[in-house]
Image (cartoon, grey):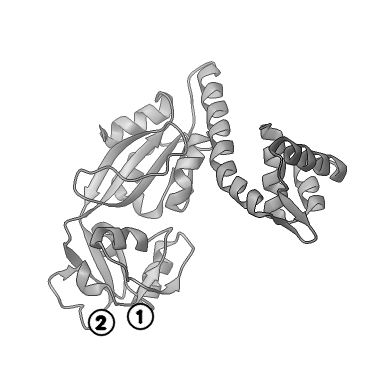
Amino acid sequence: MDPHLLRTYVTVARLASFSEAARELGYTQSAVSQHIAALEQDLGAALLTRRPVAPTPAGARLLEHAAPLLLRLDAARAEVVRMAAAGPEQTLTLAATPTALTRRAVRALPATGVTLTVLPRDEIPAVVATGAADLGLVDGLAAPSDPLRLPDVAPLTARGVAEEPVSVLLPENHPLSRRAGLRLGDLVDARWLDAPGTGLPLPQLRAANGTSGFRPALRYDGTDLRTLAALAAAGHGLVLLPRSAAEEAPGTVAVPLTAPRVVHRTELLYAGALRGPAAVLAAQLDVTRS
């Protein structure tokens, strides 16, 4: 498949409009229609209904393949461009999740030339793979010394940065706030905050406990830890956080998780060889290959 045609198709499907896709891509509407027709002819299947503009069953299946295919192409281009670039790198672009930005990580940043972007954890591998960030700091729940399960978006190197215990964040007046420790299995039916960009994701809790449950009472799609802590303090739901982040949240109590035996793990992601400020930061973090 021609990747130009595939990009056009993905854009039309996302915007549900030929004219809006033409405007975003800088094509004429006629050119967009020709792209879709050429792709449909190549595949021998109708991909879109026209009124309304929506994927057919075959088109929906193609969309599932399209995102990783196009991401791999972008990642390949970015890596070749990096390899061909002359001269040493003088700047550093870092993408990180909120709970991966520990005091130690922040202190290790170079004094100048850094661009820091805080993103939800699911977005970090893609921005590193496509060259939008030189390095990524991503975190999650894992068994001690086990690597994180990251999406296979491109050939990336992941190195362990740190591991620390995790705690359940409770309002100060919560009935469990005086406990010395909590078992995850005892909290299956509790009210939880669904905060995939900040708190440890609920699917990871279900996987760690080997069960369903952990129903969300409220979803928070932001990346601000203070907002998340305020929601927990107001009783909107429990959330699991690394101990260092949980203990600093006002109006809450951080109770250690005692079972199962899991840790909050942070990993450094990069593509290709480290050089310049990226290599310096990696050395400062004293990473070990995961």
Residue depicted at 27% across the width and 65% down the height: 211
Whether residues under marks 2 and 1 lie with C-beta atoms below 8 angstroms apart, the answer is: yes
- Judging by the rendered image, the residue that carries numbered circle 2 is 174
Which amino acid, by three-letter code, is at mark 1?
Gly
Which amino acid, by three-letter code, is at mark 2?
His
Q: Which quarter of the rendered picture does the C terminus lie within? A: top left
Is residue 14 found left or right of 124 in the rendered image? right
View extreme (front): residue: 44
Coordinates of residue 96 in the picture (x, y in percent) = 42, 46
Residue depicted at 50% across the width and 19% down the height: 83
Seen in the picture, residue 24 relative to 238 is either above or below; the reply is above
Coordinates of residue 244 in the picture (x, y in percent) = 26, 57
Mark 2 or mark 1: whose residue is earlier in sequence: 2
> Can you tell which quarter of the image residue 3 is in?
top right
Seen in the picture, residue 57 relative to 85 is either above or below; the reply is below
Coordinates of residue 173 in the picture (x, y in percent) = 26, 83
Query: In this rendering, does residue 116 appear at all?
Result: yes
- Identify the secondary structure beneath mark 2: loop
How packed mark 1 is, by other alpha carbons closer than 10 Å (few <14, some 14-19, many 20 or more), is: some
- Identify the secondary structure beneath mark 1: loop
Question: In 3D space, how far apart are the residues under numbered discs 2 and 1 (Cα atoms)?
Answer: 8 Å
Residue depicted at 22% across the width and 67% down the height: 184
Residue closest to the eye, 38 or 186: 38
> Can you tell which quarter of the image residue 277 is in?
top left
Residue 235 — which label? 1
